[in-house]
Amino acid sequence: MENRKAAGRIRLNRFIANGGVCSRRDADEHIKNGLISVNGHIVTDMGIKVSYDDDVRFKNKRLSAEKKVYILMNKPKDYVTTVEDPHAEHTVLELIGDSCPERVYPVGRLDKATTGVLLLTNDGDLAGKLTHPKYKRRKIYHVFLDSPVTKNDLFKLTEGIELDGITIVADAVSYADPDDKSQIGIELHSGQNRVIRRMFETLGYKVKKLDRVYFAGLTKKNVQRGKWRYLNDKEVSMLKRGIF
């Protein structure tokens, strides 16, 4: 972590984002709504600056400007991507345990039954950019269905499927196995909940297995199911440049 004395004072929204709570944009909303206190006093001025030694709290929980960490996980089935869920038997944070001293959070969501590439970090700014639709980060999934998919239905996916009044368009779709038409590779940017399952259900198919194989330039190569690793500097730089 950078030398605190040299760093001096930083904008409050940056301090909050550094703490892994959210992006700077969302931090401004939290400040405006009176959810942030500094040294015991609620602040609503989004332009103020704080030092690393100030007592900054979000909903009365103290934040710290931790060093940034970036973790790539190959998520297994039956683990949820929420930080805390009283109804869940397991969360992905259990797989990390005490091996990472920093508090990290999943970037985006994979539902309980979905497996594959998952990024966790305490970099709120980057997490915001990776999940915001306007940045169009690539996500590719391997879908296993209960019956062969017709070419006409593949075409419908690229034309758009209406869900909750919104048309969701697959960026690319193809057969993942030329000998098994029930396996589909699909790329899309939408972050809607259970979007792929719902798209195929609309066409009359049931998803038996869903695996995310690619997210924003990251793959699960050499990471076994249920395992994780830290990203290297090159991978972090790639994510921040947004080239994928």
Image (cartoon, rainbow, N blue to C red):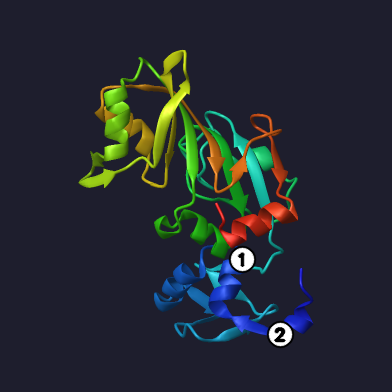
- Residue 207: x and y in percent read 39, 24
Is 4 on the left or on the right of 195, as rendered? right
N-terminal-most mark, 2 or 1: 2
Q: In this rendering, is residue 22 above or below 152?
A: below
Q: Secondary structure at mark 1?
A: loop
Residue linked to disc 1? 19
Q: Residues within 10 Å of mark 2 (few under 14, many from 20)?
A: few
Residue at 54% from the left image edge and 48% from the top image edge: 83
Q: Quadrant of residue 38?
A: bottom right
Most extreme residue toward the left is: 165
Res. 62 in view:
no
Residue at 49% from the left image edge and 43% from the top image edge: 139
- Residue 8: x and y in percent read 71, 85
Residue linked to disc 2? 8
- Which corner quadrant holds the N terminus? bottom right
Q: Report the Cα–Cα distance between label 2 and label 1.
A: 17 Å
Q: Amino acid at mark 2?
A: Gly
Q: Quadrant of residue 52?
A: bottom right
Q: Quadrant of residue 208?
A: top left
Q: Amino acid at mark 1?
A: Gly
